[in-house]
Image: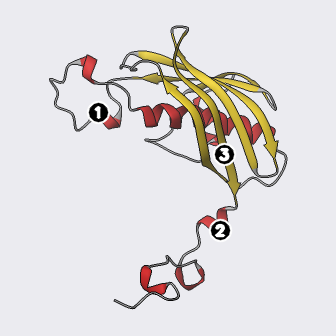
Amino acid sequence: MIELDGVRRLLAPRRPITLVDRVLEVVPGERIVAVKAVTGNEPWYARMPEDTPAEQLAYPPTLLIESWGQAAGILADLSHEGPKGVLLLAGAADVEFHRPVLPGVLLKHRVRLVRIVRELVGFEGEILVDGEAVASIGQLTMAYRPDDVLRQSGPTAPAATTATDRPGEPAA
């Protein structure tokens, strides 16, 4: 078991976006089971009126995937023997949300490592509440990128391309 302090050491994201509270089980190279408690005090609910009925406080699906992805990231870091860097979401497929998640529940993330190919890591799994799947992830791919490449700025960083930068395009 990995408690919150250990989770924080393993994850790059920090508060308020650390969305894994504890790791219950991990088998590097195979699987992880992690949990996240959803409460009505989450920062994403701060802008909602105080009298918003609880049934309208569905946890954002993007945060369900982010939380599950953080559990996957812990598994990747404990399983990947190549260069690490920053782990980024590369793609997801066959993701289904089965029902809304409301405050007051404990999410159980079950993540299975499918494959590691150089800097790419593939996963599948589900998110459970009280033993019932609230979301299924058929395939999620993450990619390691070097820290220094992502932090480039200034004249050496790649510039964004605009229509006027493309050959054959008239200047505005």
User: Residue farthest to the front?
Assistant: 168
Give the percent coordinates (x, y) of residue 39. 37, 23
Q: Residues within 10 Å of mark 2 (few under 14, many from 20)?
A: few
According to the picture, the residue beneath numbered tag 3 turns out to be: 142
Q: Residues within 10 Å of mark 1 (few under 14, many from 20)?
A: some
- Who is closer to the viewer here, 26 or 129? 129
Tell whether label 3 touches label 2 (CB within 8 Å).
no
Position of residue 153 relative to residue 93, above or below, is below
Give the percent coordinates (x, y) of residue 87. 65, 49
* Helix, strand or loop under label 1: helix
According to the picture, the residue beneath numbered tag 1 turns out to be: 45
Residue at 39%, 91% (x, y): give it. Answer: 171
Q: Looking at the rendering, which quadrant does residue 138 occupy?
A: top right
Residue at 42%, 23% (x, y): give it. Answer: 38
Mark 3 or mark 1: which comes first in sequence?
1
Query: As shown in the figure, which amino acid type bears the numbered disc 1?
Result: Tyr
Residue at 72%, 39% (x, y): give it. Answer: 122
Distance Cα–Cα, label 3 vs label 1: 28 Å
Query: As shown in the figure, which amino acid type bears the numbered disc 2?
Result: Val
According to the picture, the residue beneath numbered tag 2 turns out to be: 149
* Helix, strand or loop under label 3: strand
Residue at 35%, 31% (x, y): give it. Answer: 42
Distance Cα–Cα, label 2 vs label 1: 34 Å
Q: Is there any visible trace of residue 20 in the rendered image?
A: no
Position of residue 62 relative to residue 58, above or below, is below
Q: Is there any visible trace of residue 49 in the rendered image?
A: yes
- Who is closer to the viewer here, 126 or 152? 126
Query: As shown in the figure, which amino acid type bears the numbered disc 3?
Result: Met
Mark 2 or mark 1: which comes first in sequence?
1
Give the percent coordinates (x, y) of residue 97. 47, 24
